[in-house]
Image (cartoon, rainbow, N blue to C red):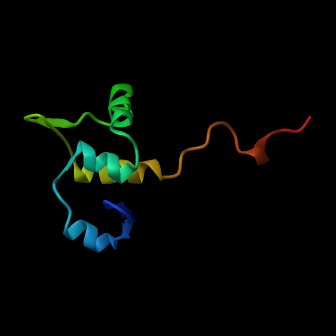
Amino acid sequence: MLIPSNRYCIRMKPATLTSNRKLLLSLNSVAEILDVPKSTLYDWVRRGLIDSPVKIGRHTYWKSTYIEAWVNQQFSPKPTRGRPRSAVEHI
């Protein structure tokens, strides 16, 4: 898994990621991890593609476990629609 840092990406082992993980991720952290602008995160929340963050004072946070699960869900196999190609009748 690649985790962006200030100037370059660091390849981290999953065991290291889970043992040193923060409980909450800020808006800036999530934007950096997903490599998207903050405005895109706000748009995804508005469109219901990602859950709303929690506001603590003036800061915006997501639970790190939610972000990790959301990313994993994006890479899970999507169900196919319709019949498989082999089942299509030829005329």
Question: Which of the image's four quarters has the C terminus?
Answer: top right
Vertical placement of 46 versus 62: above or below? Answer: above
Q: Position of residue 48 (x, y in %)?
A: 36, 29
Question: Hey, which quadrant is residue 51 in on the image?
Answer: top left
| Residue shown at the point (39%, 35%) measured from the top left | 40
Q: Give the mark count.
A: 0
Q: Position of residue 90 (x, y in %)?
A: 89, 38
Q: Nearer the viewer, residue 67 or 4?
A: 4
Q: Nearer the viewer, residue 80 or 38?
A: 38
Question: Which of the image's four quarters has the N terminus?
Answer: bottom left
Q: Position of residue 20 (x, y in %)?
A: 19, 68
| Residue shown at the point (27%, 67%) measured from the top left | 17
In the image: residue 1, left or right of residue 88: left
Q: Residue furthest top?
A: 46
| Residue shown at the point (20%, 70%) measured from the top left | 19
Vertical placement of 91 versus 1: above or below? Answer: above
| Residue shown at the point (40%, 44%) measured from the top left | 36
Q: Residue furthest right?
A: 91
Q: Residue furthest front?
A: 7
